[in-house]
Image: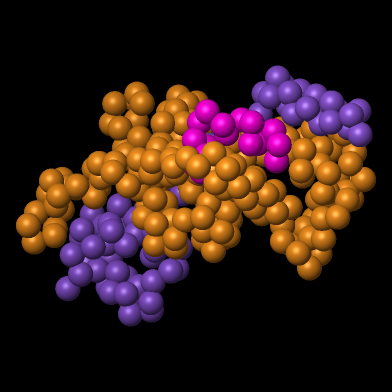
Chain colours: A orange, B purple
Amino acid sequence: MNSMGLTTEQEDDIALLKVQDHRAFENLVGRYHIQMLAVARSIIGESLAEEVVQEAWVSIYGALPRFEQRSSLKTWMFTIVGNQAKTRLRKESRTVSMEDEEQDESGYLSSGRFKPNGGWQSVPAIWDVETPDLLLEQTQLRHCIEHSLNSLPVTQGAVFTLRDIEQQSLADICNILGVSDSNVRVLLHRARLSLMQVIDRYQETGEC
Amino acid sequence: MLKCSEVVEQASDFVDENLPWYSSLRIKMHLLMCVHCRRFLRHFSATIDLAEPAGRRQATATEIERVMKHIDDIDSDI
């Protein structure tokens, strides 16, 4: 590992990317395109997200020789797509509704889940399998999780992707999406609880 | 005494270590006494651990091709 926490292999990848190696860039697109779309979609909406991400990839490709590694490569890329989506949003003079704000609270946050004194009314379900490794071995559950991630409201999905899948810091997520710290924390918490309910349901019924 | 509903509300900040030390301590004290909240937090943490391996999705060959074609088109225009 170097001072940026990169392995030798990752350093080699970055060296190839900086000389605009096509194969290395294809791998990069394969690895991050879906996540870039999630970021763009949360800022600009579904209809223009693909276009914004295409333009962001062009910018990234062009700027790679000048990438100085002051942040991680993925933070740098997510920042570029976030900035391009925000710029496009301003140009289009559009507003994208934050449906996440109005979404019903998920089961674990609903008042029916607790007694008036704040104790559990409906206690958490017992899971037959609790360890992540064993849970992941269940193919059907993986499909349920994938489906659930695709069904999250877009901003929740973007926050969850950036934080729990891509391990971005909360400060970086606020910057990338242009959302306040408190909002990011609320959206992340809701997304995690939604996903947990999917696993609850799967453990109980064997279905999504 | 912290309520179970408050443990649930603060679960993300607790596992992300975003709570002030006294709030975190209150949750830990509650967990010593509440089997349901212990189970809840165990499942909650497992859900987060599952996210990265289960949620990471690779773009399709068509999606990759579209991006590369776009870049090649722009390159050839320069």
Q: Quadrant of the C terminus of chain B?
A: top right
- Which residue is the extreme one toward the left? A116
The quarter of the picture where the N terminus of chain B appears is: bottom left
- Image quadrant where residue B76 sits: top right
In x, y percent, where is residue A180? 44, 60
A185 and A143: which one is in front?
A185
x and y, in percent, of residue A64 in the image: 83, 49
Q: Which residue is most to the bottom? A: B22
> Taking A142 as reference, is A190 above or below it?
below
Magenta residues, dominant SS class: helix
* Residue A184 appears in the rendering: yes
Number of numbered discs: 0
Q: Quick check: is A82 in the magenta stretch?
A: no
Q: Is residue A20 left or right of residue A200?
A: right
In the rendered structure, the answer to whether residue A200 lies left or right of residue A188 reads left
Q: Name the residue at 18% across, 65% down.
A: B3
- In the rendered structure, which segment of residues is drawn in magenta? A41-56
The picture places residue A104, in percent across and down from the top left corner, at 25, 41
Give the residue displayed 60% in from the left and 47% down from the top: A87
Q: Is residue A41 above or below residue A19?
A: above
- Vertical order, B73 against A97 (above or below): above
Q: Nearer the viewer, residue A162 or B53?
A: A162
Does the magenta-highlighted stretch encompass residue A43? yes
Q: Nearest the camera: A7 or B38?
A: A7
Residue A134 appears anywhere in the view? no
- In percent of the image, x 44 and y 62: which residue is there? A181
Q: Position of residue A112 (x, y in %)?
A: 13, 46
